Amino acid sequence: MSEKAVLNIDGKDYDAPVMHGTLGPDVVDVRKLYADADVFTFDPSFTSTASCESKITFIDGDKGILLHRGYPIDQLAEQSSFLEVAYLLLHGELPNAAEFTEFEHNITYHTMLHSQFDRFFTGFRSDAHPMAIMTGAVGALSAFYADSTNVDDPKQREISAHRLIAKMPTIAARAFQYSVGRPFVSPRNDLGYAENFLRMSFSVPAEEWKPNPVMTRAMDRIFILHADHEQNASTSTVRMAGSSGAHPFACIAAGIACLWGPSHGGANQEALEMLETIGSVDNIPEFVQGVKDRKYKLMGFGHRVYKNYDPRATVMQKTCHEVLDEIGHHDDPLLKIAMELEKIALSDPFFIERKLYPNIDFYSGITLRAMGFPTNMFTVLFALARTTGWISQWKEMFEDPGRKISRPRQLYTGAVNRDYVAIDKRG
């Protein structure tokens, strides 16, 4: 006999099936509750509501677990590559050698943008935020690649997925180069995904660009660690937009817009701004005491989902120190502050007891700064990486035969029925 939950409403019992996932808590299915009992459930921000069924990513925040298709994030970040993880998220299994070669070729040969697309960037002010450019540019892709916007065609869905994963680094690099007044750099088919992006972001015509294996690997890991994170705000936005049948370029643009919010994608930028506010290593004791006295807000420590250590932070911490050792960080006062604050956070009982460990945003912000990216590019890089998760979630939703347009309900607390009164008769 299947399990069920029994809800008693006004003295009458209503049965609700209990669903079991392969991991995580059981779920009470309330889809028929409104039809049967004429009531809704109330769950602001949907923090206790499963909005979909998914096989892509699993998080256990209490235990500090993050799995992509069953694979632990630390194993993927240490042993895999971003494109291999992208294939895994899209298709459900790690590719064999032949599958990966074909996938890598498909992505590599979609990295170019239509020649007319570059004119799109010049329509923005030179001081426009790169995220503003990203939001507009990704939405505009459908005007250039309308041949892959039929969401009912599996082949077109696949082509649009490849195009988005491939073109996002090109768009992000152009947004960066445009913001600093440098000429655009075209992708090269003989370079890997992360290396290509770094070259497009930092090379200039006046001199030959030389790749740095440490930076390339760090960039690739950052992409892996941000690739997907279950049903967060931006992913849910992409799914909700897609539920109407919207094409993926529009849905990913919606996801980017949501990610732009400081409570979501701006956390690593806020962590860096906190370090700037501290100003000096000498001010750290006063700042730490201010945190304990709740005078100052601590950014980049702890996590809303992970009540234990953020599993991504362990890999990001290692990557951060590899980058700092490579470039020599001794002359950067901000990085000195970060390293000292890290030592205190990992040893001070106040932080340890409250599990306020440095999270991925703390380490990624430091790392990206050390690599040469300004803070206004941090969320852009987040969006670049998360596009893989977004399009995988979008694809999974479209492959679900039970897909319906999203339509959340509400608890209405406004005025009851009123009669209209002409303006000359209103008091």
Image (cartoon, helix red, strand yellow):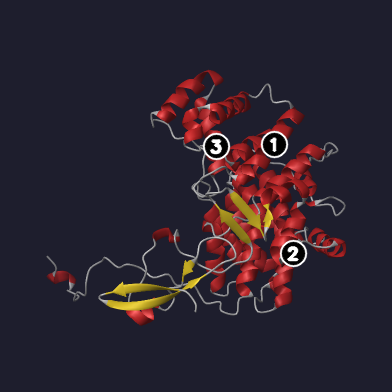
Residue beneath disc 2: 93
Residue 201: % across, % down: 73, 44
Label pair 3/1, CB-CB below 8 angstroms: no
Q: Residue at x 76, y 60 (%)?
A: 115
Q: In which quarter of the view is residue 54 placed?
A: bottom right
Q: Is residue 55 left or right of residue 182?
A: left
Vertical side of 234 occupied by 291: above or below: above
User: Residues under labels 3 and 1: Cα distance?
Assistant: 15 Å
Image position, residue 339 (x, y; %): 61, 27
Packing grade of label 2 (10 A; few <14, some 14-19, many >=20) is some
Kind of residue sitting beneath label 1 = Lys
At x 56%, y 60%, the residue is 235
Residue 197 seen in this snapshot: yes
Label 1: which residue?
A: 318
Residue at the (55%, 20%) spot, across then down: 281
Q: Quadrant of the C terminus?
A: bottom left
First-in-chain label (3 vs 1): 1
